[in-house]
């Protein structure tokens, strides 16, 4: 097959800053949970983190922890322990791996950050069902375990155009959270502080978008696989100055790469889009596999999910409501298709890889004919791989690798 050789990937220097960021983030949470110096709120990954930060909470995101369980390949055997508690093997494997880990008293944080023995105890758990119902059930388990209060936003699903009624109903739910959260935090709500945090969150989002947009260059200076780790501060740190500072440094490095024609994948020949969740336990293997064939998976819906361009410091509640309802995952298939077509054009994509994640139907968009419609309408070929975000029993490496290689060969032939 044309182009086969050992993978060469260029390391992004700012990755070291990102690692330090994540270490400081987890140590700060651990310290707060051990000493009670600050209150800890658990938040779903696209939940109302800005409100929590403005009320003085340190914010912990269980999904990031669960992604670590996947990336360290601890998840698969832990899932069974949640299954034994009645959480089915077919439901979200972030949920089952995370609950399984808690019941077994293990966490990848201990390995990565010596001295941390457990996830931080929550003072409150806050979810938004904009991504799925599983987060609610996941948080409810911990709420019972810790006897901690739980509050949430119940969102609209399958949204076409985001309308005034969507925005006002979600904004109202957000405003109604303030009273109960104020009591738990012990901090009076301050509108100026919320505006400041939302402003920082928007700045972080704009920089993260610019980082991802650099992938429109040929060759692309970064890959989707880089993005899945570099997005850490955008997920856990949005609303903080330090996340903004990190993305300035990262953006400058990537802009230098673009200026100097430095690609993330040496000799980039194909430009691919990843639709769906990453397969955390195979990130490195997949990154190598595509790079070996000079195929750059350079953009994804997943990494784009932490772009919140609607946030406005001067209108915090309504703009948060809009930003967290405009999200891809909340939208109708028509809106999703339109979005992916825009991405295909913007990044000049040769082919799309759909990941059908067994336990996350919410992030699997290949089950109702979308790949076929996109191929017919946009003329872009696609490949669907069956797998899962965390449960590696749902994945056949041999089959996946063969399909990816065949897909790359097909795209190369078409390109000539
Ligand atoms: S969106 Fe998918 S992976 Fe994320 S919490 Fe929901 S079911 Fe799990």
Image (spheres, rainbow, N blue to C red):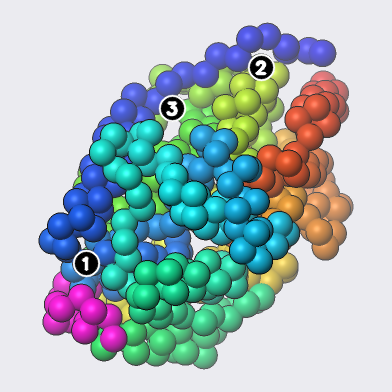
CB at mark 3 closer than 8 A to ligand 1?
Answer: no
Residue position for label 1: 39
Does the segment drawn in magenta span residue 189?
Answer: yes
Label 2 residue SS: helix
Q: Is residue 89 left or right of residue 15?
A: right
Question: Looking at the rendering, which quadrant does residue 45 occupy?
Answer: bottom left
Q: Badge 3, how many Cα within 10 Å: few under 14, some, many 20+?
A: many
Q: Which corner quadrant of the image does residue 342 belong to?
A: bottom right
Q: Which badge, 1 or 3, comes first in the chain's sequence?
A: 1
Q: SS at mark 1?
A: loop
Nearer the observer, 202 or 5: 5
> What whole-number distance in Å separates the C-alpha atoms at marks 2 and 3?
21 Å
Q: CA distance from mark 1 to mark 3?
A: 42 Å
Residue 285 sits in quarter = top right
Dominant secondary structure (helix, strand or loop) of the stretch shown in magenta: helix
Horizontal and vertical percent for residue 166? 52, 85
Along the viewing direction, whichever of 52 and 111 lies nearer the viewer:
111
Which region is colored magenta?
180-195
Residue 304's place in the image compared with 69, above or below, is below
Q: Which residue is mark 3?
A: 258
| Label 1, residues with CA under 10 Å away: few <14, some 14-19, many ≥20 | many
Identify the residue at horizontal 52%, vertical 18% (top origin). Answer: 9
Find disc 2 in the rendering and name its residue: 292
Answer above or below: position of 167 versus 405: below
């Amino acid at each position: 097959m044309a182009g086969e050789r050992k993978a060469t990937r260029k390391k992004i220097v700012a990755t070291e800053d990102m690692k330090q960021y994540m270490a400081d983030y987890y140590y700060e949470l651990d310290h707060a949970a051990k000493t009670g110096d600050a209150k800890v709120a658990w938040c779903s990954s696209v939940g109302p983190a800005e409100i929590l930060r403005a009320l003085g909470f340190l914010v912990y995101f269980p999904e990031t922890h669960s992604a670590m369980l996947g990336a360290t390949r601890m998840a698969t055997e832990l899932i069974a322990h949640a299954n034994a508690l009645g959480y089915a093997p077919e439901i979200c494997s972030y949920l089952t791996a995370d609950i399984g880990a808690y019941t077994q008293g293990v966490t990848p944080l201990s390995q990565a950050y010596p001295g941390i023995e457990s996830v931080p105890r929550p003072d409150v758990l806050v979810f938004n069902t904009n991504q799925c119902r599983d987060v609610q059930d996941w948080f409810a388990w911990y709420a019972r375990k810790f006897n901690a209060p739980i509050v949430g936003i119940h969102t609209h699903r399958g949204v076409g155009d985001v309308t005034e009624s969507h925005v006002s109903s979600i904004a109202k739910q957000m405003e109604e959270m303030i009273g109960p959260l104020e009591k738990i935090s012990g901090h009076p709500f301050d509108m100026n502080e919320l505006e400041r945090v939302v402003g920082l969150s928007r700045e972080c989002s704009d920089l993260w978008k610019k980082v991802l947009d650099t992938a429109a260059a040929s060759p692309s200076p970064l890959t989707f696989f880089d993005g899945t780790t570099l997005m850490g501060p955008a997920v856990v740190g949005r609303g903080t100055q330090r996340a903004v500072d990190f993305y300035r440094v990262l953006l400058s490095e990537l802009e230098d790469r673009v200026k100097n024609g430095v690609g993330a994948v040496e000799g980039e020949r194909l430009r691919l889009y990843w639709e769906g969740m990453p397969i955390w336990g195979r990130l490195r293997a997949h990154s190598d596999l595509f790079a070996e064939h000079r195929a750059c998976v350079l953009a994804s819906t997943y990494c784009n999910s932490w772009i919140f361009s609607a946030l406005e410091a001067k209108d915090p509640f309504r703009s948060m409501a809009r930003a967290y309802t405009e999200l891809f995952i909340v939208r109708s298939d028509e809106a999703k298709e339109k979005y992916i077509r825009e991405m295909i054009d913007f990044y000049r994509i040769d082919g799309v890889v759909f990941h059908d994640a067994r336990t996350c139907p919410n992030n699997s968009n290949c089950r109702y004919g979308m790949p076929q419609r996109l191929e017919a309408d946009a003329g872009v070929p696609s490949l669907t791989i069956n797998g899962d975000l965390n449960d590696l029993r749902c994945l056949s490496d041999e089959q996946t690798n063969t399909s990816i290689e065949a897909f790359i060969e097909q795209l190369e032939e078409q390109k000539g």
